[in-house]
Amino acid sequence: MRRTPLFSGIIYIILGLLFTYLATQNIQRENGWGLFTVFLIIIATFDLGSGLRMVAFHFKWQKELKNK
């Protein structure tokens, strides 16, 4: 089975949302921002950014395939 950028993008977005959830839970548990929380937010940012970029690429790619 071949993975499309849409599938990979959705997986990255889900992981980004999961890391965001874990970071908010960590903030509430520790009563503030710690190093681990900042690390989780950085990972979530990279995952969400990559996921959105892959989803956008998928739709651009599909549009180009239809024009050929």
Image (cartoon, rainbow, N blue to C red):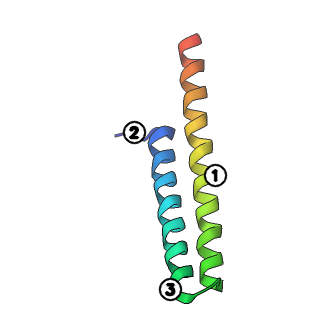
* Amino acid type at image mark 2: Arg
Mark 1, secondary structure of its residue: helix
Amino acid at dot 1: Gly
Circle nearer the viewer, 1 or 2:
1
Q: Which mark is residue 29?
A: 3
- Could you say where residue 32 lies in the image, as x and y percent from the top left? 63, 85
Mark 1 surroundings: few (<14), some (14-19) or many (≥20) residues within 10 A: some
Point 53% across, 14% down: residue: 66
What is the quadrant of the N terminus in the image? top left
Query: Looking at the picture, how far across and down is residue 2, in whole percent?
Result: 39, 39
Extreme residue in the bottom direction:
30
Total numbered labels: 3
Residue denoted by label 1 = 49
Q: Of callouts 1 and 2, which one flags the residue occurring earlier in the amino acid sequence?
A: 2
> Is residue 28 depicted above or below 53 in this figure?
below
Mark 2 neighbour density, 10 Å: few (under 14) some (14–19) many (20 or more): few
Pointer 2 residue: 2
Residues at discs 3 and 1 in contact (Cβ within 8 Å): no
**Between marks 3 and 1 in the image, the one whose residue lies nearer the viewer:** 3
